Structure formats: structure tokens, C-alpha cells
């Protein structure tokens, strides 16, 4: 009798253990983290799994290509009916198609449940709304500007420019010294886009630039031609490292590291890259380039976490997002959240002084303009890159580029109406 009872207890224990194993949720987490980023996030994931032993997190990372490839990876997984539960994505037009297709879970209820509406700067929350509804939870507030070699500037008696004319003078002096003013990578398009966006902001001003992004103003106008002309002039004058059209963005940093170029347009992710490349940070500075307009704007964008509408674990996904966006978790893992959108989070300024400088700007009331690839949907963005590359390659004049861009915009608008 005792033997039977003991056997029954063993069986019950086995069944209970099996049930617990079956109840364990495997949460898929899609990101663009590179190798070092994955290392920084390892303790974050381990901490979450320790706090939630019924959930394991599996990271699926697509690194190195930015918005050129990763959104397509997401589209493929969603079309197959097997999407990641939680995924990283940029805002604006990059996330809009997923929302329009009903592939993203609305988060308004979770904002109220977890108090997320009080956790992030209002501008990041507002930028991530679509039709007044909240689909994304802020991750980063990313501001961009010019990182530059302070030692090269000092050796040539140069200081941070206060006007666009002063910036051009810097480029002229550096060219005479045999140093490229800037470096950029044309592969995927978005790295060069940062320069083009700045040139258009400078030539057209904030109001017209916003109208161009909204397609309520014509791209075939003199200020756009002037913006494209700046790109053409920087290439013709030898102010940019030559033959950059097929260079990957990460590789475009090498001339800066080698002292062959003095500036590059990047955001807060660049300082950890400097450290990983074992660069002497004392040689680097950061400034927001002058536009000669008021308000003086800079390029900035929020990044977000989203939950797939096809996820089978939406509640666990919300728990995970709440955990990784919390003040306590981020303070315990500061290097994993360098440009966090969570209020009260700032990196160690002794370790990341340039990032701290950017965070101060992003958390201020200084107005910003979005990168064009967050204003245009992919089809129209492809046209933007087509024009941009045509000017870089010398196949289009700035005037022809402005005309072609408006033709593409007209065709895209007509297609939306049809």
C-alpha cells in the first residue's frame, strides 16, 4: 500500500513538473543589436528571467544595416504568421505600414496600466502615435549632430562653427591641409541622408522642410535645388572622403579614426563605438551644426518597442517592456541604455561625456526635425535615395534631382488616392 502511495506521489510530482515546463513562455525579442550590444543586454535579460522564471527570452538580432534590411525581416516573419512577440522599431513612416496592416498591438491600455504616460518625455510619446493611438513604447530619444576630431581642429586653429559659412570655411581649411572635412557611407542610403537632411534644413528652413516631408510643398523649388547643390559641392570640392557610395556606414568611420577625415554625422550610439575601436575620446567632440535659421533645429527621432498583434504572449510582452523600461533596471544597466527615453535616466557622464551632451539636448525643449526615412514610407524613400545617389554619382544635376523627386512624389500621392 505504501509502495503504491509513493508511486502515486512520484507520478503526481512528475506531472506537476511537466505542467510547469509546459507553462513556461518563450518570448521572442527582435532587435538590431550588434555583438557588443548583445553583450550589454545579456545581464538585462538574465535579470528579467530571474524575476520571471516562467518566461524565457530569445533574442533575434539583425545587425548592421539599419532600416535598409531589418523592417523587411519583420515583414517576412509577420507574413509567415510567426512574428517575434516584442520587437524594436523606429517611428514615423517606418512603423506606419505595420500599424496600417494591423500587425501591431495597440498599447493605450498598457500605458494606463503601467503608468508609461508618466515615464517618458512627451515628445517621444507624441512622435510615436498614429491617428491619436499609441502603438509603441519609447526606448530611445536619439539626437544627431557632428562628431569631430578636436585634435585636428586645434592643429588647424579651428573652432566649432556658429554659421553655415563658418562650417564651409572649416572644410576649405581642412582640404588645404589634406584632410577631408567629412566622411560618410553611401551603402543603404540613410547615412548620406543625414547630410542631405541637414543641407535641406539649412537651405529651406524649418517651415518649408516640414512641408516637404509632408508633401504639401513642391520638391521642385529653388531651396531644394540649393540643398542638393550643397551635397554636390561638398563632393566636387573634395570635402567628403571620395568614393563613398558603396561604403557601409560603419566602415565610413575608419577615415575619422585614422585622422584622414575630421567629422561625421552620428548620434549617441557613436561614443560606445569609439570606445570599442579603442579611440582616445579626448580627441573627439560633438556639436549641433548651425542652420542659420530660427528655431535652430537638429535631427532627432524616438525608437520604440512594439508588440506583434500575432503574438500569443501579449501579456508577457507587456511585462517585459515594463521591466526593461523601468528606472531601476536601467540604472542597474546604464551602458545598455545610453540614450534612454526613460525620464531620470542618464549615462555615467564620466564614461560617456559626449552621450551626456546629446541627452541634455534631447531632454530639453529644443525643436528637432525627423530624418527623412521616418517621414517617408519605403517606396517614396527609395525614390529619395535614387535622387540622392544620382547626384552623388554625377548622373543628376541638383535641378534635375529636385524635378525627379517631385515627379516621384506626385506619382506616389496619386497611387495612394487610387
Image: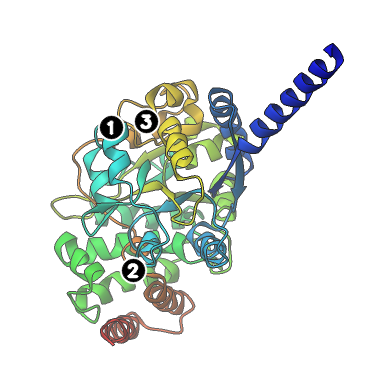
Of callouts 3 and 1, the N-terminal one: 1
| Residue 88 - label | none
Cα distance in 3D space between marks 3 and 1: 26 Å
Q: Quadrant of the N terminus?
A: top right
Q: Helix or strand or loop: what does disc 1 sit on?
A: loop
Q: Which residue was labeled with disc 1?
A: 115
At 53% from the left and 67% from the top, the residue drawn is 79
Check if mark 3's residue and mark 1's residue have beta carbons within 8 Å.
Answer: no
Q: Helix or strand or loop: what does disc 3 sit on?
A: helix
Does residue 144 lie above or below 356 as drawn? below
Q: x, y (%) of residue 211?
A: 18, 68
Q: Quadrant of the C terminus?
A: bottom left
| Residue 356 - label | 3
Cα distance in 3D space between marks 2 and 3: 30 Å
Q: Helix or strand or loop: what does disc 2 sit on?
A: loop
Query: Which numbered mark, 2 or 1, is in the foreground of this view?
Result: 1
Does residue 187 lie above or below 276 as drawn? below
Q: Quadrant of residue 292?
A: bottom left
Q: Is residue 143 visible?
A: no
Q: Is residue 37 visible?
A: yes
* Mark 2 crowdedness (10 Å alpha carbons): few <14, some 14-19, many ≥20: many
Q: Which residue was labeled with disc 2?
A: 376
Amino acid at each position: 500500500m505504501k509502495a503504491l502511495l509513493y508511486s502515486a506521489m512520484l507520478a503526481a510530482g512528475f506531472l506537476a513538473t511537466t505542467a510547469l515546463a509546459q507553462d513556461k513562455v518563450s518570448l521572442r525579442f527582435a532587435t538590431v543589436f550588434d555583438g557588443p550590444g548583445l553583450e550589454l543586454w545579456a545581464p538585462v535579460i538574465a535579470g528579467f528571467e530571474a524575476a520571471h522564471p516562467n518566461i524565457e527570452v530569445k533574442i533575434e538580432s539583425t545587425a548592421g544595416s539599419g532600416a535598409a534590411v531589418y523592417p523587411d525581416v519583420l515583414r517576412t516573419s509577420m507574413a509567415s504568421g510567426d512574428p517575434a512577440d516584442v520587437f524594436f522599431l523606429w517611428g514615423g513612416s517606418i512603423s506606419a505600414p505595420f500599424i496600417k496592416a494591423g500587425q501591431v498591438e495597440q498599447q493605450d491600455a498598457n500605458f494606463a496600466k503601467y503608468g508609461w504616460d508618466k515615464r517618458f518625455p512627451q515628445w517621444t510619446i507624441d512622435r510615436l502615435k498614429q491617428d491619436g493611438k499609441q502603438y509603441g513604447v519609447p526606448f530611445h530619444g536619439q539626437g544627431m549632430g557632428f562628431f569631430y576630431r578636436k585634435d585636428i581642429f586645434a592643429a588647424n586653429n579651428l573652432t566649432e562653427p556658429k554659421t553655415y559659412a563658418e562650417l564651409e570655411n572649416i572644410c576649405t581649411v581642412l582640404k588645404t591641409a589634406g584632410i577631408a572635412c567629412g566622411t560618410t557611407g553611401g551603402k543603404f542610403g540613410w547615412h548620406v541622408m543625414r547630410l542631405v537632411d541637414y543641407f535641406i534644413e539649412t537651405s529651406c528652413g524649418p517651415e518649408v522642410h516640414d512641408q516637404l516631408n509632408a508633401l504639401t510643398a513642391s520638391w521642385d523649388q529653388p531651396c531644394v535645388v540649393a540643398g542638393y547643390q550643397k551635397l554636390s559641392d561638398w563632393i566636387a570640392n573634395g570635402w567628403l572622403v571620395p568614393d563613398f557610395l558603396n561604403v557601409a556606414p560603419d566602415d565610413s568611420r575608419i577615415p575619422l579614426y585614422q585622422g584622414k577625415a575630421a567629422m561625421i554625422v552620428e548620434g549617441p550610439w557613436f561614443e560606445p563605438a569609439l570606445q570599442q575601436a579603442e579611440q582616445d575620446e579626448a580627441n573627439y567632440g560633438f556639436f549641433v551644426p548651425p542652420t542659420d535659421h530660427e528655431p535652430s533645429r537638429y535631427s532627432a527621432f524616438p525608437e520604440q518597442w512594439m508588440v506583434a498583434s500575432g503574438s500569443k504572449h501579449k501579456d508577457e510582452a507587456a511585462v517585459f517592456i515594463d521591466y526593461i523600461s523601468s528606472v531601476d533596471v536601467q540604472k542597474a544597466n546604464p551602458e545598455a541604455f545610453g540614450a534612454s527615453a526613460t525620464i531620470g535616466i542618464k549615462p555615467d557622464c564620466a564614461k560617456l561625456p559626449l552621450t551626456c551632451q546629446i541627452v541634455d539636448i534631447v531632454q530639453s525643449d529644443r525643436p528637432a526635425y525627423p530624418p527623412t526615412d521616418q517621414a517617408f514610407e519605403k517606396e517614396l524613400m527609395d525614390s529619395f535615395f535614387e535622387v540622392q545617389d544620382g547626384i552623388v554619382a554625377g548622373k543628376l544635376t541638383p535641378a534635375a534631382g529636385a524635378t525627379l523627386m517631385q515627379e516621384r512624389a506626385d506619382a506616389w500621392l496619386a497611387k495612394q488616392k487610387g
